[in-house]
Structures are given as C-alpha cells and as structure tokens.
Amino acid sequence: MAEGKKKKGGLLFGAIVGVAAGLLLAPRTGKESREKLFGGGMAAQKDRLREAMGAGMESAADRSESLREKIEETRNRLREQMSQAPEE
C-alpha cells in the first residue's frame, strides 16, 4: 500500500511541477495561445482547409499525369517489343 501512495504522490508532484513550468515558461498569454490554436475562428479554419484541399488536389493531379506518362511509355515499349518478336 505504501508503494501505491508513493506512485500517486510522485504523479501528483510531477503534474504540479509540469503545470507550474508550463505557466512560468510560456512565451505568450493564454489568450494569445488560444488565438494561435484556434486561429481566429471558423473562417480561418475554413481557409486553411481550402488551402490544404487545393494542395492535395494539385498533388493528385501531378501524380495522375505522371502515372499516365509512365503507362504510355510502357505501352509503347511493349508494342515495340511485340513488333520485333519473331512470329512462330
């Protein structure tokens, strides 16, 4: 039982020290931290989401085009190999 109390006491002490260190070493106020976390509301989050979606769509389009080119190159190479193969 004494072992369990030591663990709980150590956990509580660690939590208190962690919170105190966080409050003392924080580079900005709570309001500033919340502002940074939530970024000025829903409008800002929607803008960030639109930007991320746009970047994702652009990346997908680039990869799709690259894949089409590779498929076409492979197709041409196979056609060339088939045309050069001796007929039986």
Image: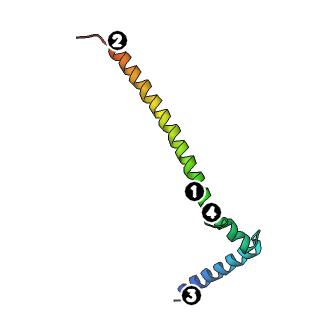
Report the mark closest to the observer, 2 or 1. Answer: 1
| Residue 43 x/y as whole percent | 62, 63
User: Element type at marker 4?
Assistant: helix
Q: Amino acid at mark 1?
A: Leu
Distance, label 3 to label 4, CA atoms, is 49 Å
Q: Are marks 3 and 1 in contact (CB under 8 Å)?
A: no
User: Element type at marker 3?
Assistant: helix
Q: What residue is shown at x 69% (from left), y 65% (from top)?
A: 36
Q: Amino acid at mark 3?
A: Lys
- Out of 42 and 80, give the one closest to the viewer: 42
82 relative position to 66: left or right: left
Query: Which residue is identified by label 4?
Result: 43
| Residue 50 x/y as whole percent | 58, 54
Distance, label 4 to label 2, CA atoms, is 62 Å
Of the residues under marks 4 and 2, which one precedes in the sequence?
A: 4
Q: Amino acid at mark 2?
A: Gln
Query: Badge 2 local density, few (<14 within 10 Å), some, or many (20+)?
Result: few
Of the residues under marks 4 and 1, which one precedes in the sequence?
A: 4
Query: Which residue is identified by label 2?
Result: 84
Query: Which residue is identified by label 1?
Result: 49
User: Element type at marker 1?
Assistant: helix
Report the mark closest to the observer, 3 or 4. Answer: 4
Q: What residue is shown at x 64% (from left), y 67% (from top)?
A: 41
Of the residues under marks 2 and 1, which one precedes in the sequence?
A: 1
Q: Amino acid at mark 4?
A: Ala
- Out of 36 and 87, give the one closest to the viewer: 36
Image quadrant where residue 15 sits: bottom right
Distance, label 3 to label 1, CA atoms, is 47 Å
